[in-house]
Image (cartoon, helix red, strand yellow):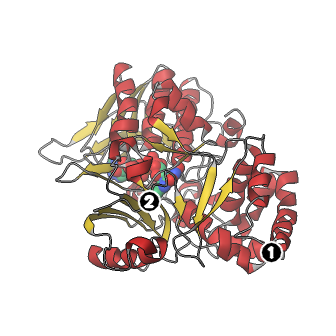
Amino acid sequence: MRVAIAGAGLAGLSCAKYLCDAGHVPIVLEARDVLGGKVAAWQDEDGDWYETGLHIFFGAYRNMRQLIGELNIEDRLQWKSHSMIFNQKEVPGTYSRFDFPDLPAPLNGLAAILGNNDMLTWPEKIAFGIGLVPAILRGQSYVEECDQYSWSEWLALHNIPERVNDEVFLAMSKALNFINPDEISSTVVLTALNRFLQETDGSKMAFLDGNPPERLCQPIVDYVRAHGGEVHLDSPLREIQLAADGRVAGFRIGGIKGKEPQQIQADAYVSAMPVDPLKLLLPEAWKELPYFSKLDGLIGVPVINIHLWFDRKLTEIDHLLFSRSDLLSVYADMSNTCREYEDPNKSMLELVFAPAKDWIGRPDAEIVAATLEELKRLFPMHFNGDDQARLLKSKVVKTPQSVYKTVPGCQQLRPDQASPIPNFFLAGCFTMQRYLASMEGAVLSGKLCAEAVSRSSSGQPGASSQAAMAVV
Ligand SMILES: Cc1cc2nc3c(=O)[nH]c(=O)nc-3n(C[C@H](O)[C@H](O)[C@H](O)COP(=O)(O)OP(=O)(O)OC[C@H]3O[C@@H](n4cnc5c(N)ncnc54)[C@H](O)[C@@H]3O)c2cc1C
């Protein structure tokens, strides 16, 4: 089958890869001139890379790791020590670590939590441990039921002190979805905790060894092309055209940068666009269908990614850091963590600025100035006194609608990869799959979508991803 796919983020590319494996011919059409969507990156005038987001790969990302293995690029993941490192609020410039010993799960996670006495007191650890018992005993069905509560509400229901939120989950919630614990669904936090506690290497982290478009997306494109598929940049989907029987008759692709507009005809059609542009392109006739009307409740959350180049080394830490700052989420010194960005003498901090709702419309200079103020707490030794670190340059990348905002009640709105239209399918991290709005979720959604397309080609109805999830 010929399958047209709109969007060359990780979901669209993974869908194309697995369609090739199933013997189909994907044609990927990407609106922008860069691969990767939310993992896209660009080079500045000095040749330095800047990215849409600081991206971490977790040990729990089984589908991503399988894909990377199938592409023979495992050596591009730079695994870090099995730890989580938080800035200490009360003692600027110092860190508190959760170190996972070499024990099977959940013992390594429990040892990491029990071994950290900086952030949680023993009564807090015990109250939290008791709160987690239903999640441990009842698993994912309990986790899904908890989608009615925000994380702050869930903690209150289990009599867990608010301080636990301030100490640990403010940072985790911002890292997971760029919002605070009073907004985020408890399903999201419990899903992450479950993965981290149930899989021995679940919380182990890796950085890609360079810019994602070249180091991660291009190998997928090469694979797709080698198997007879096509990938086209600068090819925005402008209209989903319908046939008289209600099926998709074609994709109308806009002509930009001197290219002619095109009509793409295929046997099946996939949207691997984010949910916000997809909603704008839905044909009028589909909007009343509950499958599509539910998408109105899924809305991209704003986030800002900041890059700061300094005249010296600010830290030697080769890991992700949880800032525990009101303005910032996680950050890393990419000159230590990423081979392509390596510099033995100068730091390049990449920092996620979240929640970004009140900042997304402000000028870059204001955002950088606010971030530098925060750095005085994170690196007091470099931003006080006579010989202060000097900012050489900065880049700010704003994403006004990034992954969908995972507020309570969203789980039931997430669509299956098979739509009610027999030849139209969805991929994207917002679609239903057991991982969150993440790179792993995007890759898995693409794989599930390819399976749904294949099932439809063999005359089987597009079975739900819930059934497919059982085999992933
Ligand atoms: C700041 C930030 C930090 C993040 N950190 C992490 C992390 O540490 N770990 C993690 O796992 N995940 C992280 N994520 C989330 C992760 O990047 C996403 O979940 C994932 O990349 C989404 O992939 P996708 O393919 O579903 O969507 P996208 O990447 O958004 O891809 C959709 C593609 O569709 C294209 N498109 C849009 N409209 C059209 C059109 N009309 N025609 C054709 N194409 C179109 C877009 O240009 C884009 O290329 C982060 C995201 C951000 C923004």
Q: Residue furthest left?
A: 258
Residue at position x 35%, y 26% in the image: 222
Of badges 2 and 1, nearer the viewer stands 2
Residue type at numbered disc 1? Ile
Whole-number angstrom distance, CA of label 2 to CA of label 1: 35 Å
Question: Which residue bears the numbered disc 2?
Answer: 315
**Is the N terminus in the top left, top right, bottom left or bottom right quadrant?**
top left
Asked whether disc 2 touches disc 1, contact meaning CB atoms under 8 Å apart, the reply is no
Residue 128 in sight in this render:
yes
Residue type at numbered disc 2? Thr
Location of residue 335 in the rendering, given as x and y in whole percent from the top left corner? 37, 51
**371 displayed left or right of 311:** right
**140 displayed left or right of 352:** right
Q: Secondary structure at mark 2?
A: loop
Location of residue 372 in the rendering, given as x and y in whole percent from the top left corner? 37, 75
Indicate yes or no: mark 1 CB to ligand 1 under 8 Å: no
Location of residue 149 in the rendering, given as x and y in whole percent from the top left corner? 72, 71
- In depth, the one of 407 and 29 nearer the eye is 407
Residue 89 sits in which quadrant? bottom right
Residue 150 in sight in this render:
no
188 vs 27: above or below: below
**36 displayed left or right of 178:** left
Residue at position x 48%, y 37% in the image: 77
Residue at position x 64%, y 60% in the image: 97
Question: Which residue bears the numbered disc 1?
Answer: 160
Q: Secondary structure at mark 1?
A: loop
Q: Which mark is residue 452?
A: none
Mark nearer the N terminus (2 vs 1): 1
**Is the C terminus in the top left, top right, bottom left or bottom right quadrant?**
top right
